[in-house]
Image (cartoon, grey):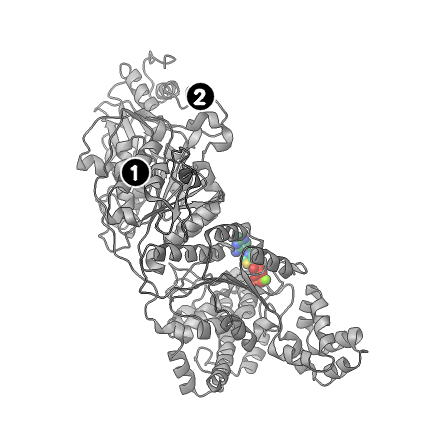
Amino acid sequence: MASRVDDLSILSELERKVLWLATWTIHNANHLRENSDGLKVGGHQASSASLATIMTALYFHTLRPQDRVAVKPHAAPNFHAIQYLLGRQSREKLEKFRGYRGAQSYPSRTKDTDDVDFSTGSVGLGVAQTLFSSLAQDYVRAHGWGLDRPEGRMIALLGDAELDEGNIFESILEGWKQGVRNCWWIVDYNRQSLDAVVREGLWERYENLFRNFGWDVVVIKYGSLQQAAFAEPGGEVLRRWIDNCPNQLYSALVFQGGAAWRKRLLDEIGDQGAVTKLIESRSDEELARLMNNLGGHDLPAVLEAFDGITHDRPVCFIAYTIKGYGLPFAGHKDNHAGLMTAAQMETFRAVMDIRPGHEWDRFEGLRQPEQALQTFLDNVPFARGGERALKAPRIDVPDELAITLQSEMATQQGFGMLLNEIAREKTELAARIVTASPDVTVSTNLGPWVNRRGLFARESMADTFKSERIPSTFNWEFSPKGQHIELGIAEMNLFCTLSALGLSHAITGERLLPIGTLYDPFIARGLDALNYACYQDARFILVATPSGITLAPEGGAHQSIAEPLIGMAQDGIAAFEPAFVDELAVILAFALDYIQRDGGDEPSERNWLREETGGSVYLRLSTRPIEQIKRDMTPALRQAIVDGAYWLREPGPNCQVVVAYSGAVAPEAIQAVGLMAEDRRDVGLLAVTSADRLNAGWTAAWRARERGLVHARSHIERLLAGLPRHCGIVSVVDAHPATLGWLGAVNGHRVRPLGVEHFGQTGSIPQLYRHYGIDANAIIAAAQAIAPGRPIRYLGAA
Ligand SMILES: Cc1ncc(C[n+]2csc(CCOP(=O)(O)OP(=O)(O)O)c2C)c(N)n1
Ligand SMILES: [Mg+2]
């Protein structure tokens, strides 16, 4: 007990220190960039103060090295301050907070250097990330990996207004289905958002909701001063008043301070005997301290709440706090954009006992001996586990994946067969693959894989159809050894799952090779979560089918247009759209290796892509069966497919026109080239397997040349190098025409980009290709217009 009291006094010193350092970091940053982003810096100041106590308790007392935390975006300064105190963050980075190469505004796994577990920024996503990371941890352990390490808790610190984000509720539902454990969410219940004061009584609704989904709910409402006051005569009356006080009024009184509290309390409950004495026996300052002493700002209350959890069920803590606690604008509804003035900062400095010039001194202004503080910090359990960013060895991937080609196949079908072949073998590769799908497992062709590898659940569940001997194509058995995670329809959850599984090597030290499947148009539904996963550098393969208007009878609601452009523009993901299954086999083998790279390889001067850093992969596939090409997969062809394009038909020296296509429109491109061969000389046919990688290589080669590497040439520049100037390019893709429209800029050729710009409709493939102008006839018409010459005789015949 004695040590607990000592700890408490040291912890309260550290709490002061965190508040000071975070406030100073922001003030300092604002001072540097006063004119550019003052408003947003303000958000940091008030929000960080709101969480200073909770984060002090968490990092200096509760956390263990295996625990992982998503810190809400505006509390980044607290996090950096804590790491600074633990010797894991430099003063230089803090001084440059929000500046170039400084500590990031919002905690970033990839950009910060002080051991951020999960990035945050887009509110709601870091919260869901913790839930899915708990599931990922369970998955890893259920497969018998990483059992020599202790289980970690996945913890999110979130704002109350953050709970407006729907993706949080989608994740709660999924977590309940999957039996989530070891997950803590700590809600900073300051009843303020960016613009406003939060609605009354929200916590009761949350409490019910969380309990309904199996969570423990702990409300940290009253601080220890308040609890003691409630025990005094008249205390009950005060408690009732606090409970009934509207959020707006409480915030306003916090802002106004002791005299305002006194007046209000005496006006409303002052004639009720004992409570008058309770109020009057306190000075203005003491009264303000009592009324501000909400649970979330009271170390004993917070520690008791955290220490009180002895089970592994998910827990939601609702901690009452005051936004801007301890700062002059505490409680004011405009404080998100508020900033302390220089004069206020001076007053605050005096209160904190900080001498000018000593703002960054770690123990400045603290009353405990430095030695005691340092000894305490050296023994903080969280910081005693060494390196927390884990590494996992790469899993071998063969150059070639086995597949038997049929004469006609769709890439989606090929994908199912490739995975089925992998599933047959007892290899490390097969063991480490984990698939996930938002209720489209069978319709994206994962059925054969699931039949062989089973569905994952922490507890086994038999397939009743199977046990009842009812014939069914699919074996739907759940077990801890299963390798497919069946998700509900919410695509956000798919991306959050991929984000969590795709960081397993760093979080649990065990490599997973996650593959997620969904319908291509619904990438847009989870796009921010996809972006978030990429920003955190999670590694996964996304397989999207069906795509484009090629899924013809499904109609406009399911036809994707923009996704290839998303694939090109999204950082951290390499997008491919193969036409043939042998190409897909090459790309999938590449992808399984690419998602495991971490910068250790040599940079590539062949295609100027950042190959060595690796990333995630997006495969846009199709359900359209097309005739396959019988050919040998030579090393050169394999390389070209991975680099993004190859000549399916080499252009001759007098080439007048080139057709460049991507994906399912291959038969139309091939047919058009055949039909125009008599009327246009030396026509070339360029198969583009990755517009994304071609484009990225091209811009990278330019950058290299601008840096003086005059011989730098990208793959697409080499492919188009021999084309005569006057040659025209017709590009065609079942997606927005801009996907390939840039090809003409590479060597200054005119381009007629064909593609789909408007919402689709139901129909057959030929009808829709004709309607939207991506059939053979449209290609020929475009060729005739861009490469003038004698009329192409088969125009209109296709
Ligand atoms: C998806 C998304 N939308 C909007 C924002 C801008 N934003 C940042 S913080 C915030 C309000 C947060 O309120 P709360 O979660 O209660 O935290 P507090 O400010 O009280 O600390 C908003 C709207 C964002 N970061 N992400
Ligand atoms: Mg809030």
Q: Quadrant of residue 142?
A: bottom left
| Along the viewing direction, whichever of 424 and 410 lies nearer the viewer | 424
Which callout, 2 or 1, points at the residue further toward the start of the chain? Answer: 1
**What crowding class fits label 2: few (fewer than 14 Cα within 10 Å), some (14-19), or many (20 or more)?**
some
Q: Position of residue 780 (x, y in %)?
A: 35, 19
Mark 2 and mark 1: Cα distance apart in space: 30 Å
Q: Residue shown at 48%/28% (left/top)?
A: 554
Kindly indicate whether the residue at mark 1 contacts the one at mark 2 (C-beta within 8 angstroms). Answer: no
When the figure is inspected, residue 367 is found, relative to residue 628, above or below; the finding is below
Q: Position of residue 294 (x, y in %)?
A: 62, 73
In the rendered view, does 632 fall on the left or right side of 511? left
Q: Kindly identify which residue carries mark 1.
A: 420
- The verdict on label 1 being within 8 Å of ligand 1 is no
Secondary structure beneath label 1: helix
Q: Quadrant of residue 788?
A: top left
In the rendered view, does 79 fall on the left or right side of 631? right
Give the residue type that dot 2 points to. Answer: Ser
Q: Furthest-right residue in view?
A: 271
In the rendered view, does 340 fall on the left or right side of 733? right
Which corner quadrant of the figure contains ligand 2? bottom right
Q: Kindly identify which residue carries mark 2.
A: 764
Q: Residue shown at 77%/82% (left/top)?
A: 274
* Position of the C terminus by quadrant: top left
**What crowding class fits label 1: few (fewer than 14 Cα within 10 Å), some (14-19), or many (20 or more)?**
many
Q: Position of residue 380 (x, y in %)?
A: 40, 76
